[in-house]
Image (cartoon, rainbow, N blue to C red):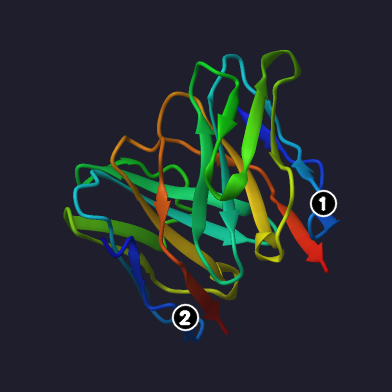
Amino acid sequence: DAGVIQSPRHEVTEMGQEVTLRCKPISGHNSLFWYRQTMMRGLELLIYFNNNVPIDDSGMPEDRFSAKMPNASFSTLKIQPSEPRDSAVYFCASSPLGGTEAFFGQGTRLTVV
Amino acid sequence: AQSVTQPDIHITVSEGASLELRCNYSYGATPYLFWYVQSPGQGLQLLLKYFSGDTLVQGIKGFEAEFKRSQSSFNLRKPSVHWSDAAEYFCAVAPNDYKLSFGAGTTVTVRA
Protein backbone atom coordinates (compact mmCIF):
# COMPACT_ATOMS: atom_id res chain seq x y z
CA ASP A 1 0.00 0.00 0.00
CA ALA A 2 1.26 3.51 -0.81
CA GLY A 3 0.21 4.87 2.55
CA VAL A 4 -1.87 7.97 3.14
CA ILE A 5 -1.58 10.26 0.15
CA GLN A 6 -2.03 13.99 0.45
CA SER A 7 -2.07 16.63 -2.23
CA PRO A 8 -0.75 19.11 -2.86
CA ARG A 9 2.47 18.88 -0.83
CA HIS A 10 2.87 22.63 -0.89
CA GLU A 11 0.31 25.36 -1.47
CA VAL A 12 0.85 29.10 -1.57
CA THR A 13 -2.23 31.23 -1.89
CA GLU A 14 -3.32 34.77 -1.39
CA MET A 15 -5.47 35.84 1.50
CA GLY A 16 -9.14 35.52 0.69
CA GLN A 17 -8.73 32.67 -1.76
CA GLU A 18 -10.30 29.26 -1.36
CA VAL A 19 -7.93 26.41 -0.58
CA THR A 20 -8.73 22.72 -0.90
CA LEU A 21 -6.52 20.04 0.57
CA ARG A 22 -6.97 16.43 -0.47
CA CYS A 23 -6.40 13.10 1.19
CA LYS A 24 -6.57 9.49 0.13
CA PRO A 25 -6.52 7.19 3.17
CA ILE A 26 -5.07 3.71 3.26
CA SER A 27 -7.45 1.23 1.69
CA GLY A 28 -9.52 -0.58 4.28
CA HIS A 29 -9.07 2.01 7.00
CA ASN A 30 -12.38 3.25 8.36
CA SER A 31 -11.19 6.24 10.36
CA LEU A 32 -9.78 9.45 8.97
CA PHE A 33 -8.34 12.44 10.76
CA TRP A 34 -7.25 15.93 9.77
CA TYR A 35 -4.56 17.55 11.93
CA ARG A 36 -2.93 20.94 11.81
CA GLN A 37 0.64 21.54 12.96
CA THR A 38 1.97 24.98 13.87
CA MET A 39 4.90 26.14 15.91
CA MET A 40 2.65 27.90 18.38
CA ARG A 41 0.01 25.24 18.95
CA GLY A 42 1.73 22.01 17.95
CA LEU A 43 -0.41 19.22 16.54
CA GLU A 44 -4.16 19.76 16.80
CA LEU A 45 -6.94 17.43 15.74
CA LEU A 46 -9.33 19.31 13.47
CA ILE A 47 -11.87 16.66 12.57
CA TYR A 48 -12.43 12.92 12.81
CA PHE A 49 -14.45 10.77 10.41
CA ASN A 50 -15.55 7.22 11.03
CA ASN A 51 -16.99 5.28 8.11
CA ASN A 52 -17.18 8.54 6.13
CA VAL A 53 -19.30 10.25 8.79
CA PRO A 54 -17.92 13.26 10.72
CA ILE A 55 -17.87 12.23 14.35
CA ASP A 56 -16.02 15.08 15.99
CA ASP A 57 -15.39 18.47 14.39
CA SER A 58 -14.81 20.33 17.63
CA GLY A 59 -11.28 21.15 16.57
CA MET A 60 -12.29 22.97 13.41
CA PRO A 61 -11.24 26.55 14.15
CA GLU A 62 -14.17 28.37 12.61
CA ASP A 63 -16.78 28.32 9.89
CA ARG A 64 -14.19 29.10 7.24
CA PHE A 65 -13.04 25.50 7.59
CA SER A 66 -15.04 22.60 6.25
CA ALA A 67 -14.24 18.96 5.62
CA LYS A 68 -15.95 16.27 3.61
CA MET A 69 -15.54 12.58 3.04
CA PRO A 70 -17.75 11.60 0.10
CA ASN A 71 -16.45 8.03 0.07
CA ALA A 72 -14.06 5.73 1.85
CA SER A 73 -11.13 6.64 -0.35
CA PHE A 74 -11.21 10.43 -0.43
CA SER A 75 -11.49 13.41 1.87
CA THR A 76 -11.09 17.16 1.47
CA LEU A 77 -10.39 19.99 3.85
CA LYS A 78 -11.45 23.37 2.52
CA ILE A 79 -10.66 26.82 3.81
CA GLN A 80 -12.74 29.66 2.42
CA PRO A 81 -11.69 32.42 2.66
CA SER A 82 -8.11 31.72 3.67
CA GLU A 83 -6.20 33.98 6.06
CA PRO A 84 -2.47 34.28 6.85
CA ARG A 85 -3.03 32.71 10.27
CA ASP A 86 -4.13 29.53 8.51
CA SER A 87 -0.55 28.98 7.38
CA ALA A 88 0.48 25.60 8.79
CA VAL A 89 1.19 22.02 7.86
CA TYR A 90 -2.00 20.03 7.51
CA PHE A 91 -1.82 16.29 8.02
CA CYS A 92 -4.29 13.63 7.11
CA ALA A 93 -4.14 10.32 8.95
CA SER A 94 -6.11 7.11 8.72
CA SER A 95 -6.60 4.19 11.03
CA PRO A 96 -8.14 0.74 10.94
CA LEU A 97 -8.85 0.72 14.67
CA GLY A 98 -10.72 3.93 15.41
CA GLY A 99 -7.67 6.04 16.08
CA THR A 100 -5.37 3.99 18.21
CA GLU A 101 -2.90 3.38 15.37
CA ALA A 102 -2.93 6.40 13.11
CA PHE A 103 -0.93 6.39 9.87
CA PHE A 104 -0.01 9.86 8.72
CA GLY A 105 0.42 11.31 5.28
CA GLN A 106 3.36 13.54 4.47
CA GLY A 107 1.34 16.67 4.97
CA THR A 108 0.45 19.78 2.99
CA ARG A 109 2.40 22.90 3.81
CA LEU A 110 0.01 25.81 3.35
CA THR A 111 1.23 29.36 3.14
CA VAL A 112 -1.31 32.16 2.94
CA VAL A 113 0.20 35.50 1.96
CA ALA B 1 -8.90 16.85 30.09
CA GLN B 2 -5.80 14.88 29.38
CA SER B 3 -2.46 16.56 28.75
CA VAL B 4 0.96 15.45 27.64
CA THR B 5 4.20 17.06 28.73
CA GLN B 6 7.54 16.61 27.04
CA PRO B 7 9.91 18.58 29.29
CA ASP B 8 12.82 18.66 26.85
CA ILE B 9 12.41 20.86 23.80
CA HIS B 10 15.77 19.95 22.34
CA ILE B 11 18.32 17.22 23.07
CA THR B 12 21.74 16.82 21.52
CA VAL B 13 23.39 13.43 21.71
CA SER B 14 26.55 11.95 20.24
CA GLU B 15 26.27 9.17 17.73
CA GLY B 16 26.53 5.85 19.55
CA ALA B 17 25.43 7.29 22.86
CA SER B 18 22.19 6.39 24.60
CA LEU B 19 19.07 8.51 24.32
CA GLU B 20 16.15 8.99 26.67
CA LEU B 21 13.18 11.23 25.94
CA ARG B 22 10.79 12.06 28.70
CA CYS B 23 7.02 12.08 28.57
CA ASN B 24 4.52 12.67 31.35
CA TYR B 25 0.79 12.61 31.01
CA SER B 26 -2.10 13.78 33.08
CA TYR B 27 -5.22 11.69 32.97
CA GLY B 28 -7.55 10.02 35.44
CA ALA B 29 -7.02 6.52 34.09
CA THR B 30 -4.30 4.84 32.09
CA PRO B 31 -4.70 5.99 28.51
CA TYR B 32 -3.29 4.49 25.36
CA LEU B 33 0.26 5.81 24.98
CA PHE B 34 2.27 6.36 21.83
CA TRP B 35 5.55 7.65 20.53
CA TYR B 36 5.76 9.06 17.03
CA VAL B 37 8.78 10.32 15.09
CA GLN B 38 8.75 13.04 12.47
CA SER B 39 11.67 13.49 10.12
CA PRO B 40 12.06 16.86 8.42
CA GLY B 41 9.39 17.40 5.78
CA GLN B 42 7.72 14.10 6.56
CA GLY B 43 4.63 12.91 8.31
CA LEU B 44 4.57 11.19 11.64
CA GLN B 45 5.57 7.56 11.96
CA LEU B 46 4.50 5.37 14.85
CA LEU B 47 7.48 4.05 16.82
CA LEU B 48 5.62 2.11 19.48
CA LYS B 49 2.47 2.01 21.56
CA TYR B 50 1.27 0.82 24.94
CA PHE B 51 -2.24 -0.34 25.65
CA SER B 52 -1.83 -2.77 28.55
CA GLY B 53 0.31 -5.64 29.77
CA ASP B 54 4.09 -5.61 29.86
CA THR B 55 5.18 -2.12 30.79
CA LEU B 56 8.33 -2.29 28.67
CA VAL B 57 7.38 -1.91 25.04
CA GLN B 58 9.61 -2.58 22.07
CA GLY B 59 9.22 -0.58 18.91
CA ILE B 60 10.75 -0.09 15.53
CA LYS B 61 14.24 1.24 14.82
CA GLY B 62 15.59 -0.12 18.10
CA PHE B 63 13.46 2.07 20.35
CA GLU B 64 11.77 1.00 23.55
CA ALA B 65 9.58 2.76 26.08
CA GLU B 66 8.65 2.04 29.65
CA PHE B 67 5.29 2.84 31.18
CA LYS B 68 5.44 3.78 34.86
CA ARG B 69 2.00 4.22 36.32
CA SER B 70 3.24 5.67 39.60
CA GLN B 71 5.04 8.44 37.75
CA SER B 72 2.50 8.87 34.92
CA SER B 73 5.42 8.57 32.57
CA PHE B 74 6.16 6.87 29.28
CA ASN B 75 9.81 7.56 28.50
CA LEU B 76 11.40 6.58 25.22
CA ARG B 77 14.89 5.09 25.07
CA LYS B 78 17.45 3.90 22.60
CA PRO B 79 20.73 2.33 23.70
CA SER B 80 22.84 3.62 20.81
CA VAL B 81 21.68 6.37 18.48
CA HIS B 82 22.48 6.63 14.82
CA TRP B 83 22.74 9.83 12.80
CA SER B 84 19.46 8.87 11.12
CA ASP B 85 17.67 9.19 14.48
CA ALA B 86 17.88 12.97 14.23
CA ALA B 87 14.23 14.00 14.11
CA GLU B 88 11.40 15.34 16.21
CA TYR B 89 9.74 12.94 18.60
CA PHE B 90 6.18 13.23 19.84
CA CYS B 91 4.56 11.51 22.77
CA ALA B 92 0.79 11.12 22.47
CA VAL B 93 -2.08 9.81 24.57
CA ALA B 94 -5.55 8.63 23.67
CA PRO B 95 -8.05 8.03 26.47
CA ASN B 96 -9.57 4.85 25.07
CA ASP B 97 -11.00 6.56 22.04
CA TYR B 98 -9.82 8.25 18.90
CA LYS B 99 -8.68 11.59 20.21
CA LEU B 100 -4.89 11.62 20.19
CA SER B 101 -3.39 14.44 22.24
CA PHE B 102 0.21 15.20 21.34
CA GLY B 103 3.00 16.65 23.39
CA ALA B 104 4.92 19.63 22.09
CA GLY B 105 7.70 17.41 20.77
CA THR B 106 11.40 16.97 21.44
CA THR B 107 13.91 17.69 18.72
CA VAL B 108 16.89 15.35 18.72
CA THR B 109 20.17 16.40 17.17
CA VAL B 110 22.85 13.77 16.67
CA ARG B 111 26.45 14.93 16.53
CA ALA B 112 29.20 12.89 14.94
Seen from the viewer's position, the closer of residues B60 and B7 is B60
Q: Residue at x 26, y 55 (%)?
A: A26
Using a 10 Å C-alpha cutoff, classify the residue at mark 1 as few (fewer than 14 neighbours), some (14 to 19) or many (20 or more).
Answer: few
The answer to whether A15 is drawn above or below residue A4 in the figure is below
Q: Position of residue B15 (x, y in %)?
A: 79, 60
Q: Position of residue A19 (x, y in %)?
A: 38, 76
Secondary structure beneath dot 1 equals loop
Labels in figure, total: 2
Whether residue A5 is situated above or below residue B70 in the rendered picture: below
Determine contact: label 2, label 1, CB under 8 Å.
Answer: no
Q: Position of residue A112 (x, y in %)?
A: 54, 80
Q: x, y percentage for residue A87?
A: 56, 72
The chain to which mark 1 is attached is B
Between A51 and B32, the one nearer to me in the picture: B32
Residue at coordinates 81% horizontally, 41% vertically from top-left? B7
| Label 2 – label 1 distance at C-alpha | 36 Å
Q: Are marks 2 and 1 on the same chain?
A: no
On screen, residue A104 versus residue A27, left or right, reads right
At label 1, the amino acid type is Ala
Residue holding disc 2:
A10
Which residue is tagged 1? B17
* A93 to the left or right of B20: left
Residue name at image x 75 percent, y 19 percent: B71
